[in-house]
Structure formats: C-alpha cells, structure tokens
Image (cartoon, rainbow, N blue to C red):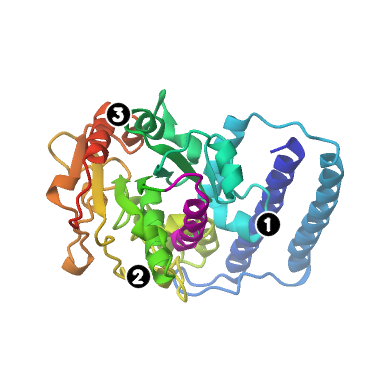
C-alpha cells in the first residue's frame, strides 16, 4: 500500500475515534448531570442546550476535517507510487483488521483486507494467470488458513513455515488464504467457499486432492466454508480429503466470554454505561469466538454484545473427510491450562452437550504439552504430526 492510502485509512480511523469518544463523554456527562440512581436506566445519553450544542459542534468540525483531509490525501496519492515496507504494513493491517475489521469493511476504509489466495503476492484466479504465477503447481493443493489478527505471512515463524515445508517434503502446492478476520466467521466462510470453487476450476493442472490446514479462527472459517459450499452445491467439497485444525476454538474461547461479562457489568450503572460502548468496538470476528460461531444464524437477528446462552446451530464435522485436531497446553500432562487462548477441550471439539461434540477419531487427536497458541505454528513436534497425518494414504472410510 502506498503511504497516502495508509494515511487515509489511519486518519479515517482517527476521525471515527473522535466521533465515538465524543458520544461516550457526552453520555457520561448527561447521566452525571441528571443524577440518576446508581443502578438502573439513565438518560438517553444526550445533553441539551448549550452543552448539547458544544458536543454537536465537535462532531461537525470533526466531519469537516475528515472531508478536507480525504481531499488532500486523494490529491497526494495521485503522484505517489512508493510502498510502505510490506511486512510491517501487513502486520499492522492484520492486527487492525482483527480488532476493527468489520468497521473497516463497512466504512470502506482502504485498510480493510480483501479476501485473496496468496503465494507471496495475490494469485490471479484464471487458468493462464495461475499457470504463470505457479509454474511448479502440482495436483495436491494445500490451503493454509490463518487466525485472528494474522495474515498469510503469519505462517512463517522463527524461520519455519508448515506450508513451505509440506510442499517441499510431500509434494503439495501451498496456497495461503488472506482474509479480514474482524468480519463474521460466516461471512468469511461464505466468501472462501465461492473463491475455492473458482481456484480449483482454474487450477493449471488436474486437481488430485485438496487439504486444508487451519490455525485458530481459521478452523472456524474452514468449517463455515465447507458448510456453505455444500449448501450451495459447489464441487470442491468432493475434492477435499483432509482438514487439520491447529488450536481452533470449536466451542469458543474464555477471553471473549470474559470480555462480554465485563461489558455487561459496565452497563449495570448509568454512570458507567457509556463506557460499555468501548467494549462494542471489538469486531464481529472477536465476538464470534465467544462460542465458536460458524453460521449466519448464530449471530443474525440478535445483539452480539448481549449476554446469553450458547444458541449456535450444530454444525458437525464434514462427513467422509479425514478431520484432525491438534491442541496445546501450557502445562505438562495436566490439560486444564490450555494454550493460553484456547482450552484443550474446545480445540478437540469436546462439549458437555453430546449433540455439540465434534467426533474426531482418537487417532486423529493430538495435544502438544508446554506449548502456547502461537507455537503451534513452529514447534517441530507439531510439524512432525502434520507430516505423519498428511503422508498417510487416505482411505475411503469416514472419520
């Protein structure tokens, strides 16, 4: 991305922050001035008279400044072709998309990451373009799907890349997905389902098999994509042979449930209620991690910030596909700790309700000890297990 484009995206966020902050401060001001009871409902969080005029004026000035800044940056971008350092820019955008990606997408912010397949750079989705971009393509496609606040570049960690190593040793052609991890999992899943259909139809050689290795949230996106591909009658699920999940929160992550509780507690008193809006800044992707949402029905027509029970649609593992799950724990034999972000039970698809359990065969489960969530991307023992599973000749038996 060239510097003016980055600047436009950043300044747009700054102006959004000014607007949001002014509303929070105004809400606190209104409730304090009205002296409501310590608990219960406060005002409509709007001030009146001269005070209200001041807050309205702040927002008007902010909007004018936004318009002028956009005009200046648009003019400057016409003469600028220089690029910011790509790796640093990618890291910044990845985190920003994970935290605020739904807002970036909905507001048309240029920092929003588009969904694409990559091998260092974005791959074209026509046969001739793919043949030129991937001249060494084989019939064994390995798709790698990253997690929250990450990108395709995140697979390379401490000099190791699972995809590159499996390509080198087992003859796969590694393709990396990049997506905006702040959008709903189901939105990313539906988009991946459509793009995979095009990729496989345009692949320059006959496709023998498709294998997906997904880290963290990426596993939910992969499950969602399969669900929507089958629903739409797409062909690529028939070519999918294996799904491998690395630390995927199939049944959610405690940190998001904790964040939801804190936001709810802030809403109890009218004096702190405006601050609960800060919790509403977290992205749709993050709130999907409370229970592990994979379908539109899991979040549509409901308040994603409200407290509530797990109401997800039960989506089982794909039938006739070899599904594998790797979890990690910071401890030794005691699996209670999990990997710092995802509990072992969630990563292995286990649930107290039998109907929600994901039926991974015992031989297709593995737990790495004294290992954190990110180390699933570079620990030799994780790669060894991947190599073992992916080297086995696939049978026609289901899980």
Say if mark 1 contacts mark 3, CB within 8 Å: no
Q: Which mark is residue 301?
A: none
- Determine the secondary structure under disc 3: loop
| Horizontal relation, residue 145 to residue 381: left or right | right
Residue 196 in the magenta stretch? The answer is: yes
> Is 219 placed above or below 106 here?
above
Asked where in the image residue 368 lies, by quadrant, the reply is top left
Residue 195 among those drawn in magenta: yes
Q: Where does the C terminus fall, quadrant-wise?
A: bottom left
- Residue 253 location (% of width, % of height): 33, 52
Q: CA distance from mark 2 to mark 1?
A: 31 Å
Tell me the magenta residue range: 185-206
* Residue situated in front as seen by the camera: 113 or 324: 324
Q: Choose between 382 and 128: the one closer to the eye.
A: 128
When asked about the image quadrant of residue 142, the answer is: top left
Q: Residue at x 47, y 62 (%)?
A: 190
Q: Residue under label 1, please give it.
A: 108
Mark nearer the viewer, 2 or 1: 1
Which residue is disc 2 drawn over? Answer: 308
Q: Is residue 192 above or below residue 392?
A: below
- N-terminal-most mark, 2 or 1: 1
Residue under label 3: 379
Q: Report which quarter residue 173 is drawn in.
A: top left
Residue 215 appears in view: no
* Vertical position of residue 33 compared to residue 76: above or below: below
Predominant secondary structure, magenta span: helix
């Amino acid at each position: 991305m060239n510097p003016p484009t980055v600047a436009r995206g950043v300044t747009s966020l700054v102006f959004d922050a000014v607007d949001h902050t002014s509303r929070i401060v105004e809400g606190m001001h209104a409730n304090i001035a009205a002296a409501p009871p310590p608990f219960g409902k406060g005002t409509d969080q709007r001030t009146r008279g001269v005070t209200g005029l001041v807050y309205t004026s702040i927002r008007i000035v902010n909007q004018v400044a936004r318009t002028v800044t956009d005009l200046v940056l648009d003019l400057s971008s016409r003469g600028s072709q220089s690029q910011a350092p790509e790796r640093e820019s990618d890291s910044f955008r990845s985190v920003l998309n994970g935290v605020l990606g739904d807002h970036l997408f909905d507001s048309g912010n240029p920092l929003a990451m588009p969904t694409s397949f990559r091998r260092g750079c974005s791959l074209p989705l026509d046969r001739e373009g793919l043949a030129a971009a991937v001249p060494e393509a084989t019939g064994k496609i390995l798709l790698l799907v990253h997690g929250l606040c990450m990108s395709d570049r995140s697979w390379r960690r401490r000099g190791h890349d699972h995809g590159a190593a499996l390509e080198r040793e087992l003859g796969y052609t590694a393709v990396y997905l990049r997506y905006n991890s702040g959008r709903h999992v189901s939105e990313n899943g539906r988009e991946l389902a459509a793009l995979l259909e095009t990729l496989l139809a345009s692949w320059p050689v006959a496709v023998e098999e498709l294998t997906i290795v997904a880290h963290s949230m990426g596993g939910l996106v992969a499950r969602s994509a399969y669900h929507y591909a089958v629903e739409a009658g797409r062909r690529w699920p028939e070519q999918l042979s294996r799904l491998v999940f690395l630390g995927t929160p199939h049944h959610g992550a405690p940190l998001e449930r904790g964040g939801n509780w804190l936001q709810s507690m802030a809403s109890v008193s009218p004096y702190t209620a405006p601050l609960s809006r800060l919790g509403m800044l977290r992205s749709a992707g993050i709130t999907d991690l409370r229970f592990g949402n994979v379908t539109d029905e899991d979040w549509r027509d409901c308040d994603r910030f409200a407290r509530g029970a797990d109401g997800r649609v039960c989506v089982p593992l794909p039938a006739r596909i070899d599904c594998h799950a790797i979890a990690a724990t910071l401890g030794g034999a005691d699996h209670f700790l999990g990997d710092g972000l995802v509990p072992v039970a969630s990563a292995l698809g286990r649930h107290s309700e039998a109907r929600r359990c994901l039926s991974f065969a015992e031989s297709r489960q593995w737990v790495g000890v004294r290992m954190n969530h990110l180390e699933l991307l570079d620990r030799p023992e994780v790669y060894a297990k991947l190599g073992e599973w992916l080297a086995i000749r696939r049978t026609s038996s289901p899980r």
